[in-house]
Amino acid sequence: MDDAERSALINEGRAAVAEVTALADRVTEAIVARIAEETGEKILVRRPGVLDARYGDLLGLEAQAQAYGAAMALIRQWLLPHDPRRLGDLLKVIPADVAEEITEHLRAAGVLR
């Protein structure tokens, strides 16, 4: 696949995702409107944000942030800002114990499954 084909495919994919997202938004709005009309209740359709958090939630977020910070401290030793490699590529070539530690921190941070 040459660069032009790759670029066209990426643009096509982005357009398809935007179309699906717009459709989902319209359907969600219709559902919320119907529930409000029939029950008088406005249902929450977004995930709770940080301003909805209670103390225990904030402690969990703090632990996630600390784990992410620990991962980044290790990543910075192996990946410089101008480095074109992706994290996944880096993890394949650094010492296995370091890659495992980074992975564990990212899992604890909730950004990697």
Image (spheres, rainbow, N blue to C red):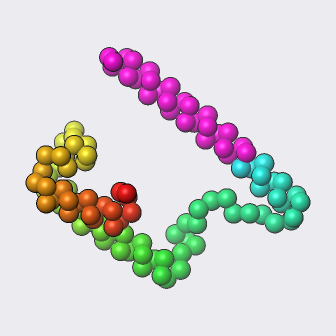
Left of 15 or right of it: where is 76?
Answer: left
Q: Position of residue 49 (x, y in %)?
A: 55, 66
> In the displayed structure, would residue 48 be above or below residue 90?
below
The residue lying at 61 percent from left, 34 percent from top is 19
The residue lying at 69 percent from left, 63 percent from top is 44
Left of 39 or right of it: where is 31?
Answer: left
Q: Main SS of the magenta segment? A: helix
Query: Which image quadrant is residue 107 in?
Result: bottom left
Looking at the image, how many numbered discs can be counted on the residues? 0
Q: Residue furthest bottom?
A: 55
Q: Quadrant of the C terminus?
A: bottom left
Residue situated in front as seen by the camera: 108 or 3: 108
Left of 30 or right of it: where is 66?
Answer: left
Magenta range is 1-27
Query: Which image quadrant is residue 47 in?
Result: bottom right
Q: Residue furthest left?
A: 95
The residue lying at 13 percent from left, 55 percent from top is 96
* Residue 16 visible in image: yes
Q: Position of residue 7 (x, y in %)?
A: 40, 23
Verify whether residue 22 appears in magenta.
Answer: yes
* Residue 82 visible in image: no
Q: Position of residue 71 (x, y in %)?
A: 24, 62
Q: Quadrant of the N terminus?
A: top left
The residue lying at 72 percent from left, 43 percent from top is 26
